[in-house]
Amino acid sequence: MSIFIKAGLWAEKRLGYKGEFDLTNYVQSLIPTPPDPIPYKSYFAIITQAGTNPPTVNKLLYNNLGATVTFEYVSVGTYNVKITGNLFTANKTAGILSTGTRTAAGQYSASDYGVTIVDTQTIKINSFNANGSQFTDGVIRQMPLEIRVYN
C-alpha cells in the first residue's frame, strides 16, 4: 500500500497545485538495491574416511542442492560422491576438499588429495600417502568438502 501526501493544502488552495507525492516510492528509492544472491547451489560437509569404508559425514553444514549426497568406496584411496538427478553440470561444478584435522604428530591428515567431476551425478575424491606416491585409505579426517554448482 502506498502512502500519498498531498503537496500541501495551502499550496493547493493558493497556487492551484494538484500534484501528489508518493512517499512509499520515494523512501524505497533511498534503500540500496540488495546484491544478487549467491550464484551457485552448495553442499558443505565435514567428512572422514576410515579403512575400506566410504567417507562419512561428521557434520553437514549446508545443503541447498536439492538432492541427497551419498558416498561410495571404489578402491584404495578412491571414493565417489553421488547424487540423484543430473546436477553436476559440466563446466559449472566445482569440488573443493580442504585440509582437515592434524594428526598427533602435527601433520595434516592427508598430504595430497584430488577432486574430479566425473559426470552429472558423480564426483571422485582421491587420497594419497604422505609423499603423494600412492593411493591411501584412512587419511581423510575431519576434512571440509564443498561442492558448488554454479547457475
Image (spheres, grey):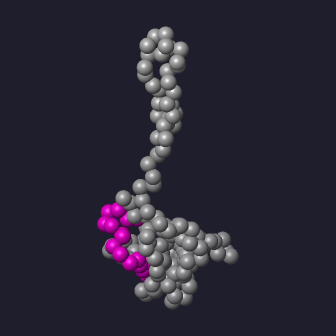
- How many callouts does the rendering have? 0
Residue furthest out toward the top: 14
Residue 93 inside the magenta-drawn segment = yes
Between 133 and 47, the residue placed more toward the observer is 47
Q: Residue at x 59, y 76 (%)?
A: 58
Q: Residue at x 56, y 85 (%)?
A: 50
State whether residue 113 appears in this view.
Answer: yes
Give the quadrant of residue 101: bottom right
Relative to 86, is 134 on the left or the right? Answer: right
Residue furthest out toward the right: 104
The magenta segment: 78-94
Give the quadrant of residue 140: bottom right
Position of 91 relative to 46 (above/below) = above
Residue 47 inside the magenta-drawn segment = no
Residue 9, percent from left and from top: 52, 18
Residue 23, percent from left and from top: 51, 31
Residue 16, percent from left and from top: 43, 13
